Amino acid sequence: MIEQLREIFSKALVSAFGEELAKVDPQVMPASNPRFGDYQVNVALSLAKQLQQNPRTIAQTIVQHAQLDGICYPPEIAGPGFINLTIKPEYIAQKIQAMAKDERLGVEKAKKPQKVVVDFSSPNIAKEMHVGHLRSTIIGDCIARLLEFRGHDVLRLNHVGDWGTQFGMLIAYLREEKPEALTTANAVDLGDLVTLYKQAKIKFDQDEEFREKARQEVVKLQNHDPESLKAWQLLCEQSRREFEKIYQLLDIKLIERGESFYNPWLPEVIKDLEAAGLLTEDQGAKCVFLEGFVNKEGKPLPLIVQKSDGGYNYATTDLAAIKYRVNYDKAERIIYVTDAGQANHFAQVFQAARRANLAPENVELVHVPFGLVLSEEGKKIKTREGESVKLKDLLYEAINRARKDLENRLAEEGRQESEEFISHVSKVIGLSAVKYADLSQNRTTDYRFSYDKMLALQGNTAPYLLYAYVRVQGIIRKGNINLDELNFEQPIVFTESAELTLAKHLIQLNDIIQEVERDLMPNRLCSYLFELSQKFNQFYDQCPILQAEERVKISRLILASLTAKTLKLGLSLLGIPVLERM
Ligand code: ARG
């Protein structure tokens, strides 16, 4: 709808004021208040200076040139020069029909499909995957799904932290304490590995002799000593198996391309930086000084790309990764989903990549930052013993709680269900609740993890949305309706205000999806689906469906089934499957 109105008003601007305004954005948006209509056009206000006219007069002229016949009632000009639009119900009815007949529910494919890299999840070897990685996994997957649905060619990359000095430390320690872990698969599990890693770190910080051993191990590994490589591979596989369990549980698909993959290209990147005149030597280390980065004392802050011992850094790998993704993957948009704490890192890496021409102007580099996951009390999430919470435990806890809720509900309603039903439904509800709780927050803020809130049947939660879907399925079962036989040619009729309100909301789907594609804010899609469920529930309360006279019944069935399809599609883009019953 917005795109269509934008086109109409773009044309109106040109025919009213000439070609110079062809590139001006008419500023069409949903009405700030439904009392003023459905949409508003704000451009007249910002043109006042340029055109040297009163914005109300400008608004009037625009309206005279806007071809809105059949779409809107005559527009109203309000306040200093807002143009308020109310869409005609007949037009909305047409849109609903078109949507209901379309497999993609009116969501267009991108006019220019892009090759997009989504770099997400990206946990670290020999460390436990933590809640930050959970956020990255859930948000990244949602972004990838939405872009795929829009027809982009998405490469989902897991930039696993599988390289670095920590391996020297770990291998040196295992050689002393658990040599079998370096030669035999499955000799330790990830939990052991994490503990051993922590012990290694303590020893590393305390013991100079051990530090030297660790350094030698790093050198051996970097020189591709076969025995060291084998040990490293074993450690990676061990962690990978654990990560895989989480991905399976959450239905996440992604390709592992860890930091080590880019090792062969690191020296080249240093040369590129050198050639671009960006390298400075500082106490033996190679650094890049970038605009806008200073330390606390106001001195320029260097980005170290090669340490004095010749080793490379996290940033060097990211520069090599950009070069690779641009040149070999042909990426046109590269999206990084990490915690907000890495914002500076990416700002520096992006600037260095631009200035060294590793990423030309037409390649978009975007960091998608997110805030922390906190406990209900607003603190760091910990177990009762003060340990950090394992992801797997957290997910299973959600499933178990969903199961308890479900069993209580079944008992209250006197329902009998099979074990298969109960375990499937609890799993879907539990995992969906975790995903949805995360995605429905504005990702840039911290959010508090509360099982009770996310599992509630009321409020902006996954169960509430899933339940709206289930309701529609219930009506269809009860009325013995075959949706394939529904007469979609029959006009939609609006007899109650709740029908029109629902319909007006339904037709916004395409706009919302394109907005998320642009701004990468999944919470917008969540709000849309939540409001859709609310509007559907009001409609359901106010408008009998199966008992209505035939014409009204069919119209209402079309609205209800379109609501279900929209929920199913929207939820699938969030990585959430629907349930037929719950
Ligand atoms: N492994 C990193 C971490 O755990 C995240 C990597 C993000 N991706 C990237 N290209 N730097 O924080």
Image (cartoon, rainbow, N blue to C red):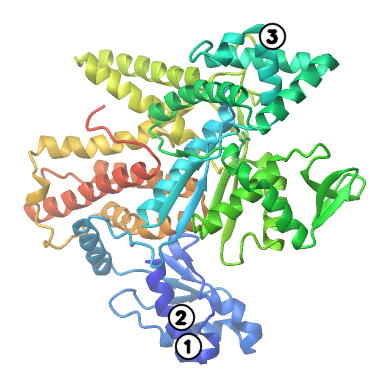
- Residue marked by disc 3: 176
Disc 3 marks a residue whose amino acid type is Glu
| Residue shown at 13% from the left, 58% from the top | 488
| Residue shown at 49% from the left, 45% from the top | 523
Q: Report the mark closest to the observer, 3 or 2.
A: 3
Query: Is residue 327 found left or right of 317 in the rendered image?
Result: left
In what element is the residue under mark 2? helix
Q: Quadrant of the N terminus?
A: bottom left
| Residue shown at 74% from the left, 57% from the top | 273
Query: Is residue 87 found left or right of 525 in the rendered image?
Result: left
Q: Say whether marks 1 and 2 touch (CB < 8 Å).
A: yes
Q: Residues within 10 Å of mark 1 (few under 14, many from 20)?
A: some
**Residue 527 can be seen, yes or no:** no
Above/below status of 357 relative to 478: below
Viewer-proximal residue among 132 and 359: 359
Q: Report the mark closest to the observer, 1 or 3.
A: 3
The residue most toward the front is 226
Query: Which image quadrant shows ligand 1?
Result: top right
- Residue marked by disc 2: 10
